Amino acid sequence: MIKRNPITTILFVVAIIAAFDVALMASGRRLLIGEEYIPETEGFGYIPPSEAKFECTYFTGRRKVHKSLSANQYDECPLIWSEN
């Protein structure tokens, strides 16, 4: 059986995570980490179906970003979002 050094394993995992973060920042893309559907009947009174939306939470590599998307254009939040 091969003995593994725990410090080397931890450094390898940290390097993989850091490379993923740098790739997200360099590409300008965002990775979906959460979504919430806001139906047209929620809130104080009636909201027309045209105003139903998704509140999407994305990770950019540095921080969380919140984006509101219309339910008329999307049926869910895209897994990878790019502003371009």
Image (tube, helix red, strand yellow):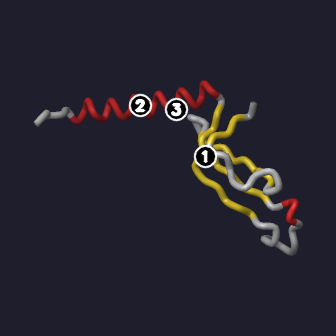
Q: Is residue 68 shown left or right of residue 57? A: right
Residue kind at label 1, given as amino acid type: Leu
Q: Position of residue 21 (x, y in %)?
A: 52, 32
Q: Taking 23 as reference, is 49 above or below it?
A: below
Q: Is disc 2 in contact with disc 1, using a CB cutoff of under 8 Å?
A: no
In the rendering, at what x and y percent does residue 57 appear? 64, 49
Where 22 sits versus 59, above or below? above
- For the point 75% across and 30% down, which residue is it? 84
Asked which secondary structure carries label 1, the reply is: strand
Other-residue count near label 1 (Cα within 10 Å), few / some / many at <14 / 14–19 / ≥20: some
In this view, the residue farthest toward the left is 1
Where does the N terminus fall, quadrant-wise?
Answer: top left
Distance of label 3 from label 2 (alpha carbons):
9 Å
Q: Secondary structure at mark 2?
A: helix
Along the horizontal axis of the image, is 76 left or right of 42? left
| Marker disc for residue 21 | 3
Question: Could you tell which of marks 2 and 1 lies nearer the N-terminus?
Answer: 2
**Residue 8 picture location, percent across and down:** 26, 30
Residue shown at the point (88%, 60%) measured from the top left: 50
Residue in the picture at 89% in, 66% down: 48
Q: Badge 2 is on which residue?
A: 16
Report the residue that reaches farthest toward the top: 26
Query: Which residue is at a point 70% across and 61% down the rendered structure image?
Result: 37
Q: Secondary structure at mark 3?
A: helix
Q: Do the numbered discs 3 and 2 sit on residues whose CB atoms are within 8 Å?
A: no
> Which of the labelled discs sits on residue 67, or is there none?
none
Label 1, on which residue?
Answer: 32
